[in-house]
Image (tube, rainbow, N blue to C red):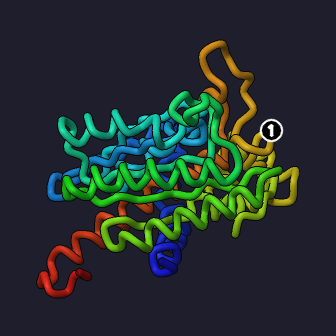
Amino acid sequence: MRRTRTVVLAAVVGVLVVATAFVGGALTGKHLATGTETSPEAPEQRVIVYGDSLVVQAEPYLSAVAHAFRLHVDVRAFGGLAPCDALAGLADDLRHSRPHLVVFAFSGNSLSNCMRDANGELARGLDILTKYRSDIETAIKMTTQAGVPFVLASPPASEDHSDAWKALDSVYRDIAAEHDPLVQYTDAGEQIAPAGEFTETQRCLPFELDLPQSRTACQDDGGMIGVRALDGVHFCSNPPTATTTAPACTEYSSGAFRYGIALVSAARLDLDYFAALSSLPSAAFPP
């Protein structure tokens, strides 16, 4: 699966050029004005992203940047969710929404009732990975039987759980390899926590040096900008509310932007890859 990962990383770098189209107005977690129109010759394809609080915080950027890739993105995410929480909604979406591609971007939560065992205990340790693998396999079967490609996205590693990230990332890679080509893997945290190594900051992206919301931070910190919240997990440090564990960012977040870019570029590349495979003689597909 190294091919997919390498291509996606190249796209993340290339799409930063596209991002400059979005900095003419206010750029925060609440609003990102694009002013970009989709060519009628290139209709948007529909992508549905299922995930947890990291996807919640990246959603405004993901949705806005998606138009530059001729995509329409719907997000099904909430803090603390696991793959098992998405299965019922996925089945409904496949029947009624007819997406062109599905993305699963879950970071290892075990908080939901569907993550409880027969004794009512929440899965812990290796049991989380076993449960994730089973539920993702169910999601893949539902999705691919509908003829829809599927992307598994690893999150950026958190500060205190690098070993857990590596284990989850390994599961995602293995699952994708077993179901290639309809299932592809991407490390969506590569521009935030490269190779699963947590860092609080990353070098400012070129457009961030001129963006009013990030320019001062980049100048004051020698060209570096924060990409993680103080909790070492999320992207922005807004205080939680009664209904959210990690609300959307109220200020520009470089980490959330990078995560959104990674998800949408992986979706675009996988759709193009799948289209290319579909144009080949059937004998070219693996059995």
Left or right of 212 in this view: 54: left
Q: Position of residue 254 (x, y in %)?
A: 66, 48
Task: Answer above or below: position of 61 versus 136.
Answer: above
Residue at the extreme top of the image, as rendered: 242
Task: Answer above or below: position of 107 versus 207.
Answer: above
**What amino acid is at disc 1?**
Asp
Question: Residue at left 63%, top 49%?
Answer: 127
What is the quadrant of the C terminus in the image?
bottom left
Q: Position of residue 9 (x, y in %)?
A: 54, 71
Left or right of 220 in this view: 280: left
Q: Position of residue 143 (x, y in %)?
A: 28, 52
Task: Answer above or below: position of 261 versus 121.
Answer: below
Q: Which corner quadrant of the image does residue 91 belong to? A: top left
Task: Answer above or below: position of 281 versus 180.
Answer: below
Element on which disc 1 rests: loop
Viewer-nearest residue: 223 or 60:
60
> Is residue 234 visible in this depiction of the protein?
yes
Answer few, some or many: residues within 10 Å of disc 1's Cα (few below 14, many 20 plus, some between 14 and 19).
few
